[in-house]
Image: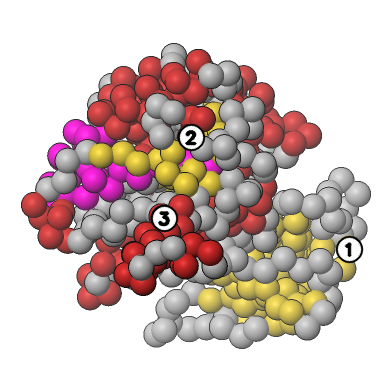
Amino acid sequence: MWLASIMFPWQFLTFLLALSADMCKAKECADFVDLELAHAIIGTTLKIRLLLFTRDTIHCGSFLSHVNFSADPHFNLSRPTTFVIHGYRPTGSPPVWAHQITELLLARKDMNVILVDWNHGAANVNYFKAVENTHQAGENLTGFLKLMKEHGASLSDIHMIGVSLGAHISGFVGANFNGAIGRITALDPAGPQFTGTPPEDRLDPTDAQFVDALHTDIDAFGYRGALGHIDFYANGGTDQPGCPKTIFSGTAYFKCDHQRSVYLYCESLNLTCTSRAFPCSSFKDFQDGKCTSCEQFGDAGCPVLGYDIDKWKHVLLKLGQSKNYFVTNEKAPFCMVNYKLDVVVWNEEDHWGYITVKLHGNGTDAVAKIDHRATQFKKFTETKLFAQFDTDLQAVTKMSLMFSTGNVFKPKYKLRVLRIRLTHLERYDRPLCRYDLVLEESKEVSFAPLPCQESNF
């Protein structure tokens, strides 16, 4: 090394250290600011950082300048751009799902993904101050999008994914552009301080060309009413399966339901399975099997939660606001499989009870417990039940049924089944039937189902 021969040893060492520092600085990967609870207690002032990720920089994003786009050669305005905006951060920690959703988005499409880090401003034990900061955050992002537009970006190619408070920030930005941005996705949009407010003070369907919302915690941190062209309610939008039921579970008790919206959306991105939802006036009617038809959506069928819902965009824009319900498993894969179960009995007296259905095929079992309420079984009257199975079986070779009443001290009943019919609601499989069964209470009966004889089913 010729440079070493003309420098003193200490000068050469200083040069190497400076060079090393410059190299490390050049390779610095963008990441969320990691604050502590102490910051939230003191209170933080709004500061927004933009973290850019592309397919070329998926594992090492860069900090994007608010004013100088040319400083980052990876920011290509001819590509679509998706903004991901987190919500309230009461402890100051970064969102644990940020990099997961980034990688999944980039796997689906060649785009710019910009993680909006407003942890400074969202981290505050005073929730009302964080809510106040959402308006300023919206103005900041509005200025950035204006600059993007001036440099040739199309507002129609902008997709904003907002979580909790981030959903309303997205709405404020969209309103500033008179709804010209392409799409806003709201993941359990925040309810406190937004419920009961006029549309200009929260997200609403006019804020983008298309607005879709997912609700998972409407009885606590989420917004109860409809906010988009289509609103999905997972498990009715309240208690999510697998989430803690008591405060003794720690912080997970408070955030699990709210955060489940992000994980359900991530599952829609990786295509491991799809959650189809059904338009209905209430979750009760949905559970009672009163909303198993999706004729209003035409050949597209029932809408699918998540990233691909824009395939239903044109139909939804004609229909107006649509509330849709679905149920999930306790953990990933969350999606369940929907069947309609029709039962006709010939007992002289009415019986009330619950049905558990098991499907068997190729060494795999699928279970559906229809137990949200006791069902009335009346002689020669078709009882329609909605059955959601935890696994999708492509071929059913055996079926099991169990009738129960939950009455421990009363005599055991027998449900005399004239006919059962099981219809897959997502495939065009021929319905499966069985005739003339006797179900003794709390005893499982197994049989091979048969293709239904009725020509009109």
Mark 2 vs mark 3: in front: 3
- Work out whether residue 258 or residue 83 is closer to the camera in this orientation and state it: 83
**Residue on which the image places disc 1:** 451
Q: Badge 1: few (under 14), some or many (20 or more) residues near its Cα, within 10 Å?
A: few
Assign a secondary structure to mark 1: strand
* Amino acid type, label 2: Ala
Which residue shows up at 54% across the image and 67% down it? Answer: 1
Kindly check if marks 1 and 2 are in contact, taking CB atoms under 8 A apart as contact. Answer: no
| Image-based side of 123 in relation to 187, left or right | left
Q: x and y percent of residue 361 in the render?
A: 80, 77
* Amino acid type, label 1: Pro
Q: Is residue 125 magenta?
A: yes
| Image-based side of 153 in relation to 193, left or right | right
Q: x and y percent of residue 393 in the render?
A: 76, 68
**Residue on which the image places disc 3:** 22
- Give the Cα distance between marks 1 and 2: 66 Å
Asked where in the image residue 21 lies, by quadrant, the reply is bottom left
Asked where in the image residue 414 lies, by quadrant, the reply is bottom right
Q: Badge 3: few (under 14), some or many (20 or more) residues near its Cα, within 10 Å?
A: few
Return the mark for residue 71.
2
Numbered range of the magenta stretch: 113-134
Work out whether 321 lies above or below 104: above
- Give the Cα distance between marks 3 and 1: 72 Å
Q: Say whether residue 286 is visible.
A: no
Which residue shows up at 66% across the image and 24% down it? Answer: 314
Work out whether 214 lies above or below 194: below
